[in-house]
Image (cartoon, grey):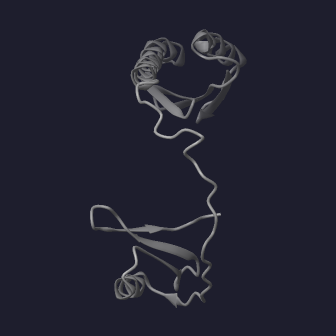
Amino acid sequence: MKVEIVGRNYNVTEHLKDVMEAKLGKLDKYFSDKEAQVKVTLKKEALSSTTEVMLSYAGKFVRATATSDNFYENIDVILPKIEGQIRKHRTKFDQSSKNTAYKEVAMYSKEDVKDKSIVREKKFTLKPMTVNEAIEEMELLGHSFYVFLEAKSNSVQILYLRNDGDLGLIEPSV
């Protein structure tokens, strides 16, 4: 697990870093390899000390904060909170994956899928226009989608008709 400790209005001592890393290292039992990253922010404001721990793993984020008069007490308060959140996420993930695994029969087999081929090609020039103008053009053509060049951003966008009758807009980014 990768641990990053940052101090705001406070110089973090080596002893405090060692204590934080040792206590956060106990969370390694929940993770395989080095997939988890922890960012600890220590803020000193007047007489109070605030510790914030942000843990990220498998696309999920867990965050806990504590405020007291010293950072050593804060980490002892935060660890049970973080551990509880990790267990909750793991339990939800495990239950959902077990509940949905292999319940549905495969809709298609390899024999059912045929090679698709392009039967028609169409080329057209993109004209700069606003979204409202694109909506009008799409309705005039009677299509379920419309590709256009957005005038303000000068980017290609796709306007489409959703199943519920509303419109959707896709703005690709690079």
Residue 53 image point, x, y percent: 52, 27
The residue located at (54%, 13%) in the rendering is 72
The image shows residue 117 at horizontal and vertical percentages of 64, 64
Q: Which residue is drawn at 42% across and 17% down?
A: 91
Which quadrant: the C terminus?
bottom right
The image quarter containing residue 22 is top right
Can residue 44 be seen at all in this image of the molecule?
no
Name the residue rendered at 60%, 87% in the picture.
124
Judge whether 136 appears above or below 12 on screen.
below
* Residue found at the very far left of the displayed protein: 164
Q: Is residue 130 left or right of 140 when viewed as pictured?
A: right
Tell me if I can see residue 90 in this picture. Answer: yes
The N terminus appears in which quarter of the rendering?
top right
Kindly identify the residue that appears in the image at 40 percent across and 78 percent down.
Answer: 143
Q: Residue 108, image x and y in percent? A: 50, 40
- Residue 140, given in percent of the width and then of the height, sits at 35, 88
